[in-house]
Image: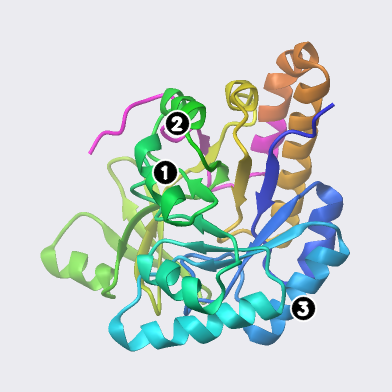
Amino acid sequence: MDKGPELLVTPLSVEDIAPLAEAGADAVLIGEEAYGLRLAGEFDRGELKKAVEAAHTAGIKAYVAMNAIFHNDQVNDLFDYLRYVKEIKGDAVVFGDPAVLMAAREAAPDLPLHWNTETTATNWFTANYWGEKGAKRAVLAREINLDAVVETKENANVEIEVQVHGMTAMFQSKRRLVGNYMEYQGKSLKVERRSKDRGMFLYDPERDAKYPIFEDSNGTHIMSPNDMCIIDELDEMLDAGVDSFKIDGILKDAEYIRNVTALYREAIDLYRNSPDEYNEKREDFLKAAEALQPEHRSLDTGFFFKETVY
């Protein structure tokens, strides 16, 4: 029986990689803030090398995030970083800015590229356009519904990756201090400090919703108030042959990421081997996922079953 789609997860540290592989991960996404957006863990060059080695020792792949938006003063650094990723045998680079693709043609022409803007991969024409430019994979936007995902996979000439679990980005600005801006404007959203480590929320009392917000070298990021989870609705994408399911572990701890990975591995394997049994256990899988959630984080299905509303 075919194993099904790749299960891609985001470790917090090198030490997390072997346990994640044991839990059923097929690949990990790693990188450092200077080059990648909204990473679960920070991996400098030394740790990046160790992480790739740990992944390969565990029999899984390691992808390196370079999906930030780069300015002129950063472009020259891309060549050296790409050469380093190739040297340490990273399995692919995830990019959004075409500058990475252009630099890779010179610095690492054989390094596989995964196109991921997180916002504009909304149709198969665009996915195939980037495929013709050299991308092996397109990462679909989180704001498209399930029918669009399936249709894109049916017509794509590249691999398709879809996030199935975790927090999603609602807003990014290259500028900082969004919280101060909102307070200055007198909006109902206020900044609530919660911890020293990326510990701020925008709080909407009308909806009783807390939006995690943090700032780093890439600017300000506002995240979804709920976590996406479609562990009980995987069948159509499995039937369509979607190539990679991503679990995003940003702002979660290592135990949570490991347990969610194991749960999705079980669900995927069950459907591939016994679709009827998976259908019988849908509710059990969802309840198990809900039991893992932090008290302040609910689960929803994102945009999989609705149109994007702005």
**In whole angstroms, how far apart are the C-alphas of marks 3 and 2?**
36 Å
Relative horizontal placement of residue 176, taking residue 225 as reference (left or right): left
**Residue 209 drawn at (x, y percent):** 38, 46
Residue at image x 30%, y 33%?
308
Q: Is residue 302 magenta?
A: yes
Proximity of marks 3 and 2: CB atoms separated by less than 8 Å: no
Residue at image x 76%, y 47%?
259
Name the element at disc 3.
Answer: helix
Would you say residue 141 is visible in this rendering? no
Residue at image x 49%, y 47%?
139
Q: Camera-side residue: 47 or 223?
A: 47
The residue to which callout 2 is attached is 152
**Residue 169 drawn at (x, y percent):** 41, 54
Which amino acid is tagged 2? Thr
Proximity of marks 2 and 1: CB atoms separated by less than 8 Å: yes
The residue to which callout 1 is attached is 127
The residue to which callout 3 is attached is 50
Tell me the magenta residue range: 287-310
As displayed, is residue 296 above or below residue 143?
below
**Residue 32 drawn at (x, y percent):** 55, 76
Within 10 Å of disc 3 (Cα), the crowding (few <14, some 14-19, many 20+) is some
Within 10 Å of disc 1 (Cα), the crowding (few <14, some 14-19, many 20+) is many
Residue at image x 46%, y 81%?
78
Assign the N terminus to one quadrant of the image.
Answer: top right
**Residue 278 drawn at (x, y percent):** 75, 19
Relative horizontal placement of residue 196, taking residue 205 as reference (left or right): right
